[in-house]
Amino acid sequence: MSNQQKIGVIILAAGESKRLGRPKQLVRFRDQYLLDHALKVAGSIDFVTKTLILGANYSAITKQIQKHSFAVVQNEHWQEGMASSIRKGVEGSLKNCPKLEQIMILVGDQPFVNRQHLHNLIDSQLQNNSEASFSEYGGNLGVPAIFSARLFPELLRLKGDHGAKKLLFKSNLEYSTVKLEGGHFDVDTEADVERLKAMEQE
């Protein structure tokens, strides 16, 4: 790991995929589940802690995925929204490594996230000594993103369906950005699944 920093990773995959009507974590793309893709990409990097947060459809998902050395944590309060999963992930990561210096957060339904992009985020974060580094796509900032220990208390205070992107509204936040081609594409509806199938051969 760059500069031998203690960096953990959390994958958020606790939602019920209400709009899709079935677990989007188990949508297949290029011969693997979307969640397996995220686990494989993040699992290939030497993070000191690796945590997967599941909630809705916990049993169905755990029976299908390859864990890639991730600790699987069930968020029984997933209906509260993404903030509850972030809190659960940060708490678990710090329990496993109290001296953690950075935490990266991903979601389980971004099919075009790759290993190089995660390395680029880490390098940007450490070189700029930022509080956070966000992925940039489609004119927006979002995950994957990485947060320094300075922001851990803020992550633990998140509430409701607000993800870590809410921290962008924090005054004087020192952050960097790294472009991610295709990062805007996630899977929420059957139309998205069909678009994804059409891209399989690209």
Image (cartoon, rainbow, N blue to C red):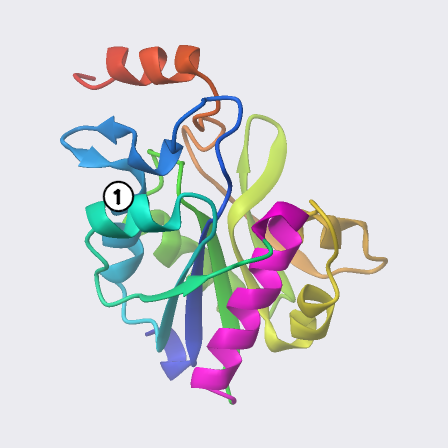
Is residue 163 visible to us here? no
Along the line of sight, which residue is nearer the eye, 66 or 79? 79
193 versus 15 height, above or below:
above
Does the magenta run of residues contain 37?
no
Give the quadrant of residue 109: top left
Q: Badge 1 local density, few (<14 within 10 Å), some, or many (20+)?
A: many
Does the magenta run of residues contain 97?
yes
Q: Which residue is drawn at 56% across and 66% down?
A: 88
Q: Position of residue 29 (x, y in %)?
A: 23, 28
In-image side of 139 versus 69 (left or right): right
In-image side of 194 versus 201 (left or right): right
Q: Residue at x 75, y 66 (%)?
A: 157
In-image side of 89 versus 28 (left or right): right
Q: Residue at x 48, y 24 (%)?
A: 188
99 versus 77 height, above or below:
below
Along the line of sight, which residue is nearer the eye, 172 or 194? 194
Q: Is mark 1 on a helix, strand or loop?
A: helix
Q: Position of residue 141 (x, y in %)?
A: 61, 40
Per the picture, the main secondary structure of the magenta-coloured stretch is: helix
Which residue, as the protein is rendered here, is positioned at the far bottom? 99
141 versus 63 height, above or below:
above
Kind of residue at badge 1: His
Q: Name the residue under label 1.
A: 37
Looking at the rendered image, the quarter that the C terminus falls into is: top left
Q: Which residue is drawn at 73% across and 59% down?
A: 158
Q: What is the total number of numbered labels drawn onto the structure image?
A: 1
Stretch in magenta: 78-98
